[in-house]
Image: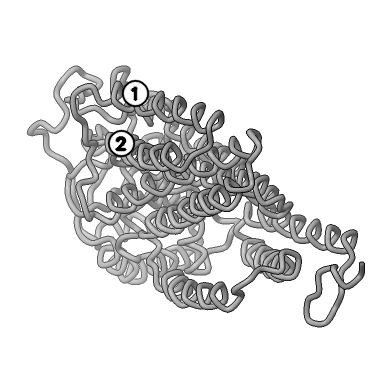
Amino acid sequence: MISSWPVLLGVTFTPVTLTGIYLASTICFVLALKALSSPRHARRGNLIGVAGMVIAVGLTFADQRIGHDWIIGVGMVIGAAIGIPAARKVRMTAMPQMVAAFNGVGGGAAALVSLVEFLHDVPAGVSPDKVVEIIFGLVIGCLSLSGSALAFAKLQELMTGRPITYPSQQMVNGGAGIAVVALGVVTIALPNLGTLAAMAIISLFLGASVVLPVGGADTPVLISLLNSFTGLAVAADGFVLDNLVLIVAGTLVGASGALLTKMMSDAMGRSLPNIVFGGFKPAVATTAGGGVAGDSRSVRSSDAADIGTLLAYSRKVMIVPGYGLAVAQAQHVIAELAKTLEDRGVEVAYAIHPVAGRMPGHMNVLLAEADVPYESLIEMDHANPQFPTTDVALVVGANDVVNPAARDLPGSPIYGMPILNVDQAGAVVFLKRSMRPGFAGIDNELLYDPKTVMLFGDAKESLTKLVASVKAA
């Protein structure tokens, strides 16, 4: 009967029309992801994604004819009141933490949906295939919730960011995984709340336990993996609820998160199992000459006046931004320095490493805030051939991504990691606060190279002085 069909804002939707609009919503998500792959189209991608979500939420209310709509409305208002200010005020350096927090909330929501559906269906009898879907959503959602919460705490420095290990840790994790599988089999055979709750508790423990031994630059990789898990949990809920949008959106998030994780692992020159189960081990890094890194060798430092003159009379300068640039919020100053050099006829470009900062695209977005032309951002594979013809490589806040040990020193914790070959430039200028190592915790041999000159201090202050020096040259 027509009266049983969904109605929204006075408009009656037939099942065929409803399915078509749901499909349009999923297409919006696909187009949004495509646009988000480029900083030039990212804003448009966000708007397309928002439009798709608004359509999906509105039609879901009409389609499901949910009771207690006002309670859901209140929850949405509270969520928006928290989420919008948080997203607007977050610093670029804290973006991975925000991703972890939001991802954890998504995983928790997916787990709760699975639990509620289980409680709703058990009295009437639930089929084994649906129990499998519920278990998958619950377990993966709980893993993502606890793992993301711990990753957030590490990156926010609410706890140590170093790897935390204890005896037989991997055996404990393996035992927990086996217990979840065993309880899952029991729950499929004899659906009951007790075994489902036990699975949820063990999964929460397992998610946190997997994150504990991961530290340093590996944590954002794990966040990306957990984001993929949340997508899979949402897709499982889509099957449980027979909701097309959840299935497609969850699958998209799961697939894109997996691809991003693979890209980050490749950019670090390490396999995902090595990152999850290995982590950087404390080690004494040796130099190419066999000595011990971090010894009493001296470095060559200079002041802003001399370095400004060097930059002003160069033909080509390649800027290498890193996490230190984001911490100092110096993107506008470095854009001003580049503009000042270009006004003098100097060719300027930015060499971007895939994991410069804490996540892929971090530097691209940061520099976009300062209106740096997208064409000036050169990815690593295209930047490396240009360093031999570069007069000065200006490294601002980067360390491990330019460390020659990754290329030349077998046995180094970062050996095999693709790097920017800044050591092939005519001169290298390092802007650093101190000689403190990067995330990998090892010394950078390039700092002791005779062609390298250091400018110590806060990146924003140092760049401001360099702008003044170039203008005066």
- On the image, the x and y values in percent for residue 68 come to 59, 74
Give the residue drawn at x 37%, y 56%: 97
Q: Looking at the picture, which amino acid does disc 1 mark?
A: Gly
Residue 165: quarter of image: top left
| Residue at mark 1 | 175
| Residue at mark 2 | 209
Q: Label 2, secondary structure: give it.
A: helix
- On the image, the x and y values in percent for residue 36 come to 63, 56
Q: Nearer the viewer, residue 321 or 257?
A: 257
Q: Is residue 274 above or below residue 76?
A: above
- On the image, the x and y values in percent for residue 458 come to 23, 62
Q: Label 1, secondary structure: give it.
A: helix
The structure's colour scheme is one colour
Q: Looking at the picture, which amino acid does disc 2 mark?
A: Ser
Q: Nearer the viewer, residue 49 or 269?
A: 49
Give the residue drawn at x 24%, y 52%: 432
